[in-house]
Image (cartoon, rainbow, N blue to C red):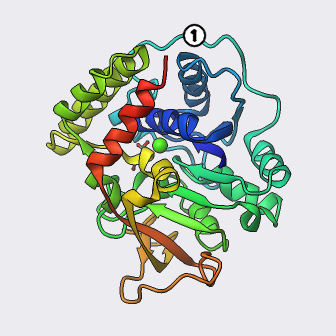
Amino acid sequence: MKVVLDCDPGHDDMVAIILAATHFELLGVTTVGGNAPLWRVTENALRILELLGRQDIPVAAGAAGPLMGVLPREGERVHGVSGLDGAELPRPTRSVVREHAVTFLIETVMRNPGTAVIATGPLTNIALAMRLEPRFARSVARLSIMGGSVTQGNVTPVAEFNAWADPEAAQIVFSSGARLTMCGLDLTRQAAMGPEEIARLRAVGTRTAGVTADLLEYYREASERLTGSRAVPLHDPCAVAALAAPELFEFRFAEAAVETRGAHTRGMTVVDQRHWEAPGADGRPSRPGLVRVATKVDAARLFDLVAEALAACP
Ligand code: BDR
Ligand code: CA
């Protein structure tokens, strides 16, 4: 499967890049301001691909902030000021491509029928692509996102970071009619890594495994200080694995929308659990607003998948 990954690395985004680069023909990585400012997450994406020896994968920089308002600084609390604190990654030997991420996404998807898009940051670039090219939403073979929640949030009682960082963009995407899979917090919290799981990744022994383990340990400790939990959810890799290894997941279809106005609920994904619905005959949501929600993941097998990917890296 051909894939473009739109992300804001970010510790868990890094693992998503590693999984995507090993499982798919990764046509490009596009970046969006989110966990850290755009220039930092873009530099991080270049450094990660440098570490992987995958300088052949183009990186395109995208939106610096949300459609409305300013980029929140909440990401710093778990990812550090750089967006990827906790280890030193190699300096990039190249730069980003000239095209803006939104142009890159549109051109890549329109020129390569069957291309899937995975989004693990705020949905600003994806929403802009849908606005600029009205055929984009229907042309993406699959759109798998990490974002939202069926129940509790993380940045607010009800809102998850990626949806909350750009609710207008998220609502454009949710109502677009794209073949959308949502990996929200209820799912990603099932894939939480404690020190033992991180040690198992380190034991894979490659340089990439060591650096990834150092980074995940930073991320885990930062998250433990905030939440009191020893285990940190490996959010973003779920959105990659939902396409790479769907047999590890359970999915249900439901109507979902993003709250953009609520005084206490802005950024909340409102999933109608009263009516789980059947997909359309072609596997697409049978009408706009219907989303394929990943509800269960086999965490042990997901971690195996990550370990295998790290073993395949330098
Ligand atoms: C999401 O927010 C970011 O901090 C992570 O990278 C993930 O994409 C989880 O709410
Ligand atoms: Ca992310």
* Residue 2 percent coordinates (x, y): 68, 47
Q: In this rendering, would 309 be left or right of 171?
A: left
**Residue at 58% in and 78% down:** 289
Numbered-mark total: 1
Residue 258 in sight in this render: no
Residue 45 in view, yes or no: yes
Q: Nearer the viewer, residue 18 or 183?
A: 18
User: Of helix, strand and loop, which one carries label 1?
Assistant: loop
- Per the image, the residue denoted by label 1 is 91
The residue depicted at 67 percent of the width and 20 percent of the height is 55
Q: Residue furthest bottom?
A: 275
Q: Is residue 187 above or below residue 171?
A: above
296 up-or-down from 109: above or below: below
Give the quadrant of residue 64.
Answer: top right
Residue at (61%, 43%) from the top-left corner? 5
Check the image and report above or below for 306 versus 293. Answer: above
Mark 1 lies within 8 Å of ligand 2 (Cβ measured): no
> Which one is nearer the viewer's eye here, 51 or 119?
51
Amino acid under disc 1: Arg
In the rendered structure, the answer to whether residue 91 lies left or right of residue 113 reads left
Q: Quadrant of residue 91?
A: top right
Q: Nearer the viewer, residue 262 or 248?
A: 248
Would you call the spot at circle 1 few (<14 residues within 10 Å), some (14-19), or many (20 or more)? few
**Spot occupied by residue 255 in the image (x, y as percentages of width and height):** 49, 81
Q: Position of residue 103 (x, y in %)?
A: 81, 45
Residue 95 spot, x, y in % from top left = 72, 19
